[in-house]
Image (spheres, helix red, strand yellow):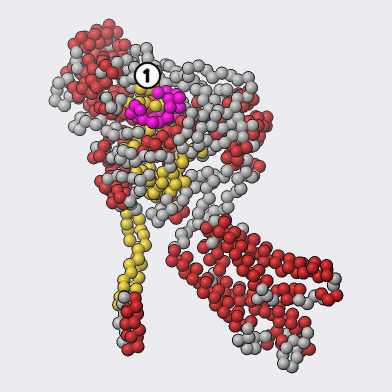
Amino acid sequence: MDTDGAYQEQRVGGGRVPKPAGPPPMPGAPPAAPPMPGYAPGAGPAFAQWLRVPRPKAEPGTWRFGHQPRATAETEPAQDRALLSGAVISFLACVLLWSLLTNGYIPKVDVPVKALTPQSWWRLGEDPVDGRGVAALQVYALLITGALVVWFSRLGSWSLAFDRLVAARGPAARAVGATLGALFVLLLVWTKTLPVFDLVGGHLPYEDMTADTQTLVTYLVYAVTALPVVVFFVRLARRTGGPKSGPPAPVPGSPPPAQDPVAWTELRAAGLPETAERLAAEIGAGRMNDVDYARIRRAWESVRADPTRARAFAQAVRDKGAAACVHPSGARDLPARAARHDLLVRQVLLGTVEDGERNPWARRGTGLALDPDVLGTSLLAVGPSGSGKTRRLVRPVVETFALQALAGQAAVIVVASAGTPLGPDSAYDVVVRVGDPDSVYDLDLYGGATDPDEAASLLAEAFAGDIPGTEVRRAATALAQLLGPFHAAYGRFPGVPELRELLDQVPAALDALRTALEDGGLHLMLRELDARARQYGAHGDPGPVLADRVALLDRPAFAGFFDTTGQGRPFSLRSLEHPLRVRVDLPERAHADASRMLARLLLAQFNASAAARADRSLFAFLAFDDASHTLTPESVRGIQRLRSANAGVLLALRTLDDVPEALRTPLLGAVGCRMAFSGVTTWDGKRFAEAWGTEWVETRDVTHRTVFADQPLTRAMHAFRKLITGKSVTTDAVTVRQVERERWSASELAHAVPPGHAVLSLTSVRGERAAPLLVRLVGPS
């Protein structure tokens, strides 16, 4: 199906297309979903139920799968204690007053009932004449009991106490609390402490009934008496614990028919009921997974943008079912998953927000997830070796974008040293092993650029961007004076050995280039070449420095790499318009300086290519497992511009000392998401504390003052109390005030973050912010 260029062959530079070893076989029967890796949703009915789980809108970084907002305000422990004590005291007062009334210690209590009933019901001694007076007293006693319960329950806030202290602890606590309350009331009724049995069944003519009838009536009396109590406490057990900040979440598995994701209602509304039925049948039969669902949704969005693709879309679904619009590699899932992903909202779960006072009340205990909406502002992560940056951050993030690439939603490139555990090679479309002679793919040194000035600026950023005192602009000019003539003469850019000879002003190389230019009549390019020759060796000439940097790549280990003659398979970052999964392995151990220079080159090329894309529908992402000595002033400015280009980067550092001092503050300002792992130094913590700023908090200062009594009796009581407790009698003076304090201080970041945790702040591309959160990361360290 030709619904989108994202599902066609992907060009990776040099006019070549990375393809799998062979095209995937076309099954005769409908293809089944690939085996589920870890953390993948189940197939069949389990997958349908997973699709129906509500995913409400939430703050940036909130794991939306089944999310339920918490109460809008935090309950202070002191308020809970006051609520409990008030409920207990009011209950005891209610019992005391009720006991005094029912046992006759308060006289003339029954005057109202005798005044409102006929005088013939009462003897002269005010005792009832017959059962009518007895029933009136029983009803009156129950009315008094009910009035006391209602009055004292409101006075002691029994309902609020039950919601906050019992129901808020979960359904089990609600059920236990309601059961104990029901048993207590039934015990009062059964022991005739409350005259309910006497009122309901004590006035029936049992002497006129047979034995069987008496038994039946007795059981009916028990049922009539117990039923209201049971109904009341069952309803109490089904109450929720406290108010919520939003409407209750719908029950999973029963969404409105118009919003059921399994029914593909959009396709039915667009006049494709057969296509919708086929896809729904694929879900029910267990032949569709989450990647298939997201990929077909993405293809349908392209059809809505261009309705002429509707016929091809319907034909592909009819022929291939869940395997329609498959990724060019033929893969429908990754070989393994190291994290939980929700491709419906494009999120990956990183951990859980700690349920502590350092985090906002509404975010405590919620899942912490990342998605393109927040990663579009780029993420800086700092933590020492062993803190979990690779396993708990880089790999899950790269993995989620690899899944999104299979769904036609993203393009991901990860740069790491060789041997970094970022998944098997089969999880990537292109694996570039720089310096490995067995590498299938090469790296385009010029990033697919065709303009010599653009190529020169990219190389200058990588070669001279980190050298103090060297102007990148002059280095770019020097390179352009050589790349332009060479490209005009030979129709290509020079390889590494050729570029080194030109920068070193080797006579043979210059003469050959000059001859080619003269033969082609390219006199303007001869002027460029002559200008480079005149500037060579002058004060401040960047040529020798550039030659030294190029020499780092002109090593035997890199022989055959960075080919420009068209004989290799170079990967170019110009392919960001296609859903590619790329991993670049750098020889960090053997060639550290060359690896850092290539990392700077890849970052510069990514900034340029992401901004120059004609189609920005795919989210482009670049991840560095170690971004040490990678950043330059121009690359930091480029990172800031990625927000509007639907792209982002992930920069992992062991310490901010690996960044030039002049760039540390601009870097923290350029990224929207900042993450400090456990074990950062106080110097790094200070930078993060400055970036996160301050907030107004309420503080309470308690002053204890000794009480000096004037009266002899009071002094004696104070002396006795001091003898018993060992402390003088004091009064407390509490001062409440608003003070401005750092959200996280440098000392707290360095010493108060437990192992396996991190402090993370987020900013979305729309400007929404999440305050720094202490997160317990999932996965092994």
For badge 1, the amino acid type reads Ser
Q: Residue at x 62, y 40 (%)?
A: 260
Q: Position of residue 463 (x, y in %)?
A: 25, 26
User: In the visual, does 221 lie left or right of 328?
Assistant: right
Q: Residue at x 31, y 73 (%)?
A: 704
Q: Quadrant of the N terminus?
A: top right
| Residue 421 is one of the magenta-drawn residues | yes
**On screen, residue 80 above or below 543:** below
Region in magenta: 407-431
Residue density around tag 1, few if under 14, some if 14–19, many if 20 or more, within 10 Å: some
**On screen, residue 451 above or below 755:** above
User: In the visual, does 483 lie left or right of 544?
Assistant: right
Which residue in the rendered view is the most extreme toward the front?
211
**On screen, residue 27 above or below 657:** above
Between 629 and 694, which is closer to the camera in this rendering? 629
Between 573 and 353, which is closer to the camera in this rendering? 353
| Residue matched to label 1 | 439
User: In the visual, does 222 lie left or right of 153?
Assistant: right
Q: Position of residue 310 (x, y in %)?
A: 61, 27
